[in-house]
Every structure is written in structure tokens, then in C-alpha cells.
Image: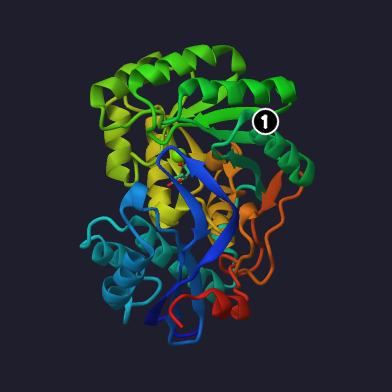
């Protein structure tokens, strides 16, 4: 086997505009200003992943991710073997926070391991299904525009599961959107809502009551988890699984929120917990007997590929549709072979590693540090 000693870790900021902004209660995204992370080894294998800055969610920026990988995380793992994952975790966890930067290093390391043993990481992690059903996220707009987008996504990609962004704006508008979608598509589509902490507990309760006849399957982060008693009060009366997303970026927070009665399901995002920490979150959720959903950090194609690698590897993350379609709104992307969603599904790669192979010309065109 080739020498798996890590020789250096690159952090490459890039920027690719979206065709249209994605708006939600906690912020909006107009440009994918992510950071490609590449782990180089002495034997010549290179692992690749990416980190999406979400300042309104984790406090990270493109500049902070680039700096923390360059100054702390890269040096922390350089000189170790890619197989020393427990040591990597111990060293990276000496720095608090920075979840997407840590996750990208972990997934790039896994990419090398897969290449080294000639196996898809999807299989090394469990290889449960060949792919996942895809859920599409509908950002804030008028009811008519959001229904039109759902039609387009359904016609072009066969997607029939939609997560509707709600919260912050007058709740009646969000209720109108969900009602319009249900009236347009009937039972042909699955619908759930994500508030990104945008409502109060009482607004959330009122909106849930008004949407009670609309067959929602999940309610995510409708109000802030830091409104501790309000959140618990809301979750107690919520008739469908209440998903914790940005309130649970670590296994400890997963435990705290679940045991406090502040959530009844967990969103797993490889962009914030990589593969290694996502396994911990998944096993924790399974041990505590709560459902999981594979979430999206508004990932590009690199991040989406990593999501499907993990999600399709496990039974629990394969039950529901995974959020895997945000990249569709980007004007371009970095993968040499663009991802294809067909009949509402995205397949996990079958090549060794995670399957992330970059188009180097595109990386040169979009990188911000040249
Ligand atoms: C989500 O599920 O909340 C929106 C903000 C973010 O950080 O992730 C997205 C999607
Ligand atoms: Mg969410």
C-alpha cells in the first residue's frame, strides 16, 4: 500500500454564484463561497472535500475556515497516517467550534482511505443502499413562484419530496405556501417545514395548528432551541417529529436536546459532522430511538456527494429522502463529472474513495486565492 502519511493539507477558497438567491429565516445564500480541502499523502494519494461557511449557523466564514485549516488543522494532522482518525479527532477537538472545517478534513481523510484500499467510502461505511431519494428545499418566495419551482423540479428530476422554508416572515404567508403546494399536487408529494428558528414558540404552535390538515411529515427548528421552555412546550404538542438541526452540531448537543424534550428527530449533516462524527450522531439517535433525516448545508456538488456517500451507507438515513439538490441552483460547479438526479434519486458513487474528482480548470477559474 502507498505511504499514507499526510504531508500537507490545502484550503482553497472559491466562489461560484447561484442562479437565484436561496432565502430562509436565518439568512440567504447568493454565492457558493466554499473552501475546498485537500489532504495530500506521501504516497501521492489526495483526498478532497469541502466546507461551506454558514456564519448565521456556526459562526464560520470563508476566511475563517481557510485560516483554521491552514494554521491549525492542517499542521495538527500533518505527519500522521490517514488511518489515525482517533488521533485526528483528539487533536482537532482541542480547538472549539469550526464544525464544517473539521468535517471537511475528516471527509478528505476518508477519501484517501477509500482510494488506498480500492473501495468506495460508501461501502466502507456500511453500503446499505445504492442511493437515496432526494428532497428539494424551497426557499422563501411567493406561493405561486414556489409552486412553479416544485413543478419544475418534479418534471426535470422526478423529485416529489419538498422541504418548505418557513419562519420570520408573517406566518400566514408560509401557511399559504404549504396549502398552495398541497392543493396543487395533492398526495403526490411529501411536504415538511423548516423554520430556521424564525418563529416564536406560540407562532409555531399557531402555524402548526393551521397546517394540521396538510399532511406535513416533519417540523424542523421552528423556534430557537435557546428559548428552552418555549421549545419544550412546543415539542410536547407537536404531532409530528420535531427535527433539531442547527441546535445539534455535536453529539453532546444531540444528547442534551433529546433528553431535554426539545426535539424528537435529528438532522444529520456531513458538512458539519463529516463521516466520523456523523456516525456518532447516528448511533446516538439509534440508541435513543429517534428518527434521523439527512440534511443539507446548502452544499455544492462536492458536499452533496459526501452526503449521499454517508446517507446511502446506513439504513436509518436511507428511510427518508435526503436533502441533496441545493447544487441545482448553482451556475457551475467543480466536479469533473456533474451529479445527476434521475427519477428523484441520487446514486452513491461506486469508485474507490468518495468519488470526488475535481475539474482542475474550473477550480483554477473560481478559486479566490490566486
Ligand atoms: C437547513 O436545513 O437549515 C439553511 C441554513 C443552513 O445553515 O442550512 C440550511 C438548510
Ligand atoms: Mg434546517
Secondary element at tag 1: helix
Query: Would you say 173 lies left or right of 60 here?
Result: right
The answer to whether 189 is drawn above or below residue 332 in the figure is: above
Q: Which residue is mark 1?
A: 144
Residue 153, quarter of the rendered image: top right
Residue at image x 37%, y 42%?
246
Name the residue: 48% across, 12% down: 209
Q: Position of residue 348 (x, y in %)?
A: 64, 56
- Of residue 8 and residue 369, the one placed in the foreground of this image is 369
Q: Name the colour scheme.
A: rainbow
Identify which residue is drawn at 48% across, 87% down: 43
Q: Is residue 149 above or below residue 48?
A: above
Q: Is mark 1 within 8 Å of ligand 1?
A: no
Q: How many marks?
A: 1
Q: Residue 103 location in percent, x, y?
A: 40, 60
Q: Is residue 181 above or below residue 282?
A: above
User: Residue 90: x and y, percent?
Assistant: 25, 63
Give the residue at x 41% y 31%.
168
Q: Residues within 10 Å of mark 1 (few under 14, many from 20)?
A: few
Residue 164 picture location, percent across and down: 56, 33
Q: Is residue 209 left or right of residue 249?
A: right
Amino acid at each position: 500500500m502507498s505511504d499514507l502519511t499526510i504531508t500537507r493539507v490545502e484550503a482553497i477558497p472559491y466562489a461560484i454564484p447561484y442562479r437565484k438567491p436561496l432565502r430562509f429565516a436565518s439568512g440567504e445564500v447568493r454565492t457558493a463561497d466554499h473552501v475546498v480541502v485537500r489532504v495530500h499523502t506521501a504516497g501521492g494519494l489526495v483526498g478532497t472535500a469541502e466546507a461551506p461557511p454558514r456564519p448565521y449557523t456556526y459562526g464560520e466564514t470563508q476566511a475563517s475556515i481557510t485560516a483554521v485549516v491552514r494554521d491549525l488543522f492542517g499542521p495538527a494532522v500533518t505527519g500522521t497516517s490517514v488511518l489515525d482518525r482517533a488521533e485526528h479527532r483528539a487533536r482537532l477537538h482541542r480547538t472549539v467550534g469550526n464544525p464544517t472545517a473539521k468535517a471537511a478534513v475528516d471527509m478528505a481523510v476518508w477519501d484517501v482511505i477509500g482510494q488506498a484500499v480500492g473501495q468506495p467510502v460508501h461501502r466502507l461505511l456500511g453500503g446499505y443502499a445504492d442511493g437515496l431519494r432526494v428532497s428539494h428545499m424551497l426557499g422563501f418566495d411567493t406561493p405561486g413562484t414556489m409552486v412553479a419551482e416544485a413543478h419544475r423540479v418534479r418534471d426535470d428530476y422526478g423529485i416529489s419530496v419538498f422541504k418548505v422554508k418557513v419562519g420570520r416572515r408573517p406566518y400566514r404567508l408560509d401557511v399559504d405556501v404549504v396549502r398552495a403546494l398541497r392543493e396543487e399536487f395533492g398526495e403526490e408529494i411529501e411536504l415538511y417545514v423548516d423554520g430556521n428558528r424564525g418563529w416564536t414558540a406560540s407562532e409555531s404552535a399557531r402555524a402548526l395548528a393551521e397546517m394540521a390538515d396538510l399532511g406535513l411529515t416533519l417540523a424542523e427548528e421552528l423556534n430557537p432551541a435557546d428559548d428552552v421552555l418555549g421549545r419544550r412546550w412546543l415539542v410536547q404538542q407537536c404531532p409530528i417529529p420535531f427535527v433539531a438541526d442547527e441546535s445539534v452540531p455535536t453529539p453532546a448537543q444531540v444528547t442534551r436536546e433529546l433528553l431535554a424534550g426539545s426535539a424528537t428527530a435529528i438532522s444529520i449533516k456531513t458538512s458539519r459532522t463529516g463521516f466520523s462524527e456523523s456516525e456518532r450522531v447516528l448511533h446516538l439517535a439509534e440508541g435513543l430511538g429517534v428518527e434521523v433525516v439527512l440534511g443539507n448545508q446548502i452544499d455544492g456538488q462536492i458536499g452533496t456527494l459526501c452526503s449521499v456517500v454517508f446517507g446511502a451507507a446506513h439504513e436509518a438515513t436511507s428511510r427518508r429522502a435526503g436533502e441533496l439538490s441545493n447544487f441545482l441552483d448553482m451556475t457551475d460547479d467543480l466536479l469533473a463529472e456533474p451529479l445527476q438526479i434521475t427519477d428523484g434519486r441520487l446514486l452513491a458513487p461506486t469508485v474507490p474513495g468518495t468519488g470526488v474528482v475535481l475539474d482542475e480548470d474550473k477550480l483554477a477559474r473560481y478559486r479566490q486565492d490566486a
